[in-house]
Image (tube, rainbow, N blue to C red):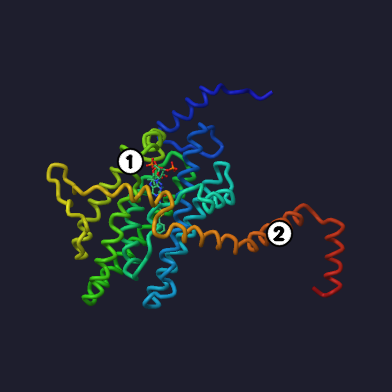
Amino acid sequence: MAETVPAQTLEDRFEAVVAAEQRIEPRDWMPDAYRATLIRQIAQHAHSEIIGMQPEGNWLTRAPSLRRKAILLAKAQDEAGHGLYLYAAAETLGVDRAELTEKLISGRQKYSSIFNYPTLTFADVGVIGWLVDGAAICNQVPLCRCSYGPYARAMVRICKEESFHQRQGYELLMTLMRGTEAQRRMVQDAVDRWWWPSLMMFGPSDADSPNTARSMAWRIKRHSNDELRRRFVDMTVPQAEHLGVTLPDPELRWNEERGGWDFGEPDWSELTRVIHGQGPCNAQRVERRRTAHEDGAWVREAAVAYAAKRAAEAAGPTEASEATNVTEQENGK
Ligand code: BYC
C-alpha cells in the first residue's frame, strides 16, 4: 500500500522549496489556494495577450508603410504566441484551455484593463509599444523569478520579445516626432490618452490590493503594485523628455530625498469601472473574441479528428482501416 505523507509535511516541503528560491513544478504538491492563485493570474495574463491583439490589430490594414505593417503583424503574432505559452503553463495546473476561453467570453475571468481603450490614430500603436509594453516589462521581468516553474520559464521568453515591442514603439514615436507639427500633436494626444490607463495596468494601490500580500509570500509576485508603478514612472520620465512629449500629470516632480519621481494619484474609480466591464471598448473586445472563437470551431474539430485518426493508426491496424487501405490502393490513391 502506498505510504501517505501527512499534510503538514507536504506543506513544510512546499514552503521550504519556495524559501530556498527553488521552483515548484506541476507534479509537486502545492496548497489549493496557491494553485487557484496561479490559475487566476496566468489565465488573466494569457487572456490579456490574446485580447491585446485587438487594439493594435485595428491598424494592420491601415499601417502607413510596408515596413510598419510587417512590424505590427510580427508583434501581434508574438502576442498570440505569448497567449499560447501562458495557456500551456495554466494547463499544467490542471485546467483546460477551452474552459479558460469559455470563462473569458462569458465574463467570468478578467483581462488587463488597458485593452479596453480605443486606438484612434497610428500614434497609438507607438504609444502602446512604448508605454503599455514598457509597463508590461516592469511588471513581468520579476515574474521570470516566480516560484512556479512553468510560468517563470514562459516569462523569460515573453520578456525578451516584449523588449523588442517596447523599442519598436519608441522608434515609431521618434520618427513621428521628427516629422510635421501635426504628427507631433498626434503623438502628444496619444500620450495624453494612454498615460493614466498605463499606470492603472499595475493594479489598485497597495492598500486596496487584496491579493498582493499572499502572492508575495508565495513568491509569485516579487514587488507590490505601487512599487512597480513607481519603477515604471522613474524609467519613463527621462524617455518622455528625450522624446519631447509632456506627461499629463501636473503633480509629476523629482523627489531629491527619495531619488525618484513623485506623481499624482490615478483615478481609481475609472480602473474599477473598466475592470468591471464598463470601459470604452469592453463589450466590443469580448464580442470579437467570442466571434473569433466560434469561427474557429471547425479548426478545433478538424484537429481533434486528425489527432484521433493518428492515435488509431498508432494503436495498430483494424479490420476496417485495412479494408480502407486496400480500397485506396485499388483506387490508386
Ligand atoms: N486590469 O489584488 P490585486 C501585455 C484585478 S499583456 C484588470 O492587485 P493581483 C501586452 C485583479 O486581477 C500583460 N484587472 O491582484 C499584450 C484582482 O481581481 P481578481 C498583462 C486587474 O493579481 C498585448 C483585483 O483586480 N499583464 O503585456 O495581485 C499588447 C485586485 O487586484 C488589473 C499581466 O497580466 C488590471 N489592470 O495583481 C501589448 C501580468 N489590476 O483576479 C502588451 C500578470 C488588478 O481577484 N498579472 N486587477 O478577480 C499581474 O501581475 C497581476 O495579476 C496584477 C494584479 C498586477 C495585474
Q: What type is the residue that disc 1 sits on?
A: His
From the top left corner, tell me how far across and down residue 311 is, in percent. 73, 54
Residue 255 drawn at (x, y percent):
14, 46
Residue closest to the eye, 312 or 62: 62
Cβ atoms at labels 2 and 1 below 8 Å apart: no
Residue under label 2: 305
Q: In the rendered view of the protein, which quadrant contains the N terminus?
A: top right
Q: Is 198 located above or below residue 126 in the figure?
A: above
Report the residue at 26% width, 68% height from top: 187
Q: Please name the residue shown 82% across and 56% down the image.
A: 317
* Mark 2 vs mark 1, CA separation in Å: 45 Å
Q: Is residue 47 left or right of residue 247?
A: right
Image quadrant assignment for residue 258: top left
Single out the residue that lies furthest toward the left. Answer: 256
Q: Is mark 1 within 8 Å of ligand 1?
A: no
Which residue matches tag 1?
Answer: 223
